[in-house]
Image (spheres, grey):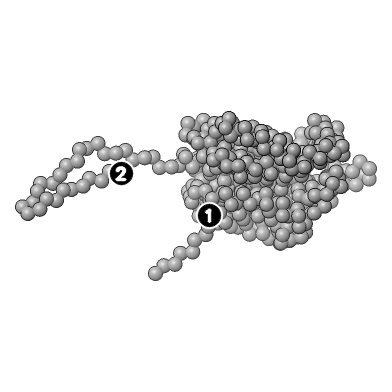
Amino acid sequence: MKIKFGIPRGLYLFGVLFMSRIYTEFFVAWEGDPLLRYYAFALLGITVWVTMRNLRYLTGAMGWWFGLTVLSLVLLAFESYGGWGRWFVYLHVFSKLTDFLLVFGVYAYYQRWGLPDLKLLIGSIPPILFLNLVIFHPETFTMEGFLKQERGVSSASAFLLILPLLYYLNVYFKKGSMLYLIAFFSTLALIVFLQHRTVWVTTGIVLAIDLLLLMRTVSVRPTLKRVVPMLVLPVLAVSLGGLAIVLNNEAVQKKFEQNIADIRNPEKQGTGNFRLNQFEAYVPFLQEYPIAGMRLKGFELPIQFYHRNTGEAVWANGTGHHFHSFYVDRLFYFGLLGLLLAVAPPIYLVLKRLRQPAPMTLEAVTLVAYVCGGLVYGVSYNWPDYYLGLLGLALSAATVADTAPAPVPALSRPVTRQPKADHASIPSVLLHS
């Protein structure tokens, strides 16, 4: 007797989500702990193994994208060996390409085995984040902490909340369950409460994209019957839940006004001004290396961004340049070619899927809408590692309909019977597919 040890399909995806700080903080207190780096290396090794085992599922544009990414890694390794005598001299620069292997590993794996049940994996994100805040950052829930913007979690963790937000909304539109509607508004309230302005903007744009994509489904529609409770429930929550007292607090109102002003005037105040100053400090190098970027030489470049008051470098030399923008980061290290390698293939694949008449599943709409938010989020922050895995999952979900086997047409020949035997009647049966 053969014993087969199966691995749950959702385990690989959970391993990707586990890269978020809302999970790892339960096990590792310090964000720079070497254990986190070892975990990232282990997941990369598993991803390479999974990709090689399912390489045949990387076809078409995904195959070309994978090939170009591997070629870029090989060329970077040769550049490293030729200039520094080591194949992988600065892992910080290499990681900006190796991290993208998650896209192909997740895509190929779930193309082969099908999507896992997303209900538990996605639905557990808000409770885990809330539990993380309660245990490790209780000051977040105080009025003083709110006014001082003690957010408790990073923008990358808050960005992850948009995924269950979309999932709850879409399931509500499909089933009409009040439980999912309550979960939607609870998650939305948590996003607002965390005060990550970039995530606020991303949430608004992604919700609009999600509603448009729902038009491509069969059974999910934002009908009037579903929309009316969405308008009534927030009013009841504010009036009966005591939120009106908090929202009418003058200090709270001023805080929200300040956050909105920061969004409207990013070049003059808030962290938007910080990003603009950082970008301006590196413009000469972006202009000098516009095509392929500075690559490994960029790692050795001294930090160009300094504190206005002290004149000290914002980050220590020899740690890389930590840009608060995915686009600036790509342009600095790999130029226009590197930026196109990162964003052009997924945009092409999503547009290609939208041009096809086949309807999309609820899961595909949820995931595609979420990864579209990465284009907005990337203006202010670098893409989180887990996002690349979700990008591969979204592309896999969106192409499931393309890879489904075509139905076999029914036979048109009339049913015939065998001649009767001398002592029995034995009709033959024609099986139709």
Q: Position of residue 292 (x, y in %)?
A: 69, 39
Among all residues in the image, which is located at the extreme front? 240
Instruction: Tell me what residue is drawn at x 72 percent, y 51 percent.
Output: 130
Task: Say few, some or many: other residues with alpha carbon within 10 Å of mark 2 (under 14 / 14 to 19 / 20 or more).
Answer: few
Instruction: Tell me what residue is drawn at x 75 percent, y 53 percent.
Output: 133
Indicate the amino acid at tag 2. Ser
Quadrant in the rendering for residue 89: bottom right
Q: Position of residue 13 (x, y in %)?
A: 59, 52
Q: Is residue 230 left or right of residue 416?
A: right
State the CA–CA distance, disc 1 to disc 2: 30 Å
Q: Element under label 2?
A: loop
**Quarter occupied by the N terminus:** bottom left
Q: Is residue 286 left or right of residue 119?
A: right
Tell me the residue that label 1 is attached to. Answer: 9
Q: Position of residue 365 (x, y in %)?
A: 56, 38
Tell me the residue that label 2 is attached to. Answer: 433
Task: Say few, some or many: other residues with alpha carbon within 10 Å of mark 1 (under 14 / 14 to 19 / 20 or more).
Answer: some
Q: Position of residue 113 (x, y in %)?
A: 48, 51
Q: Element under label 1?
A: helix
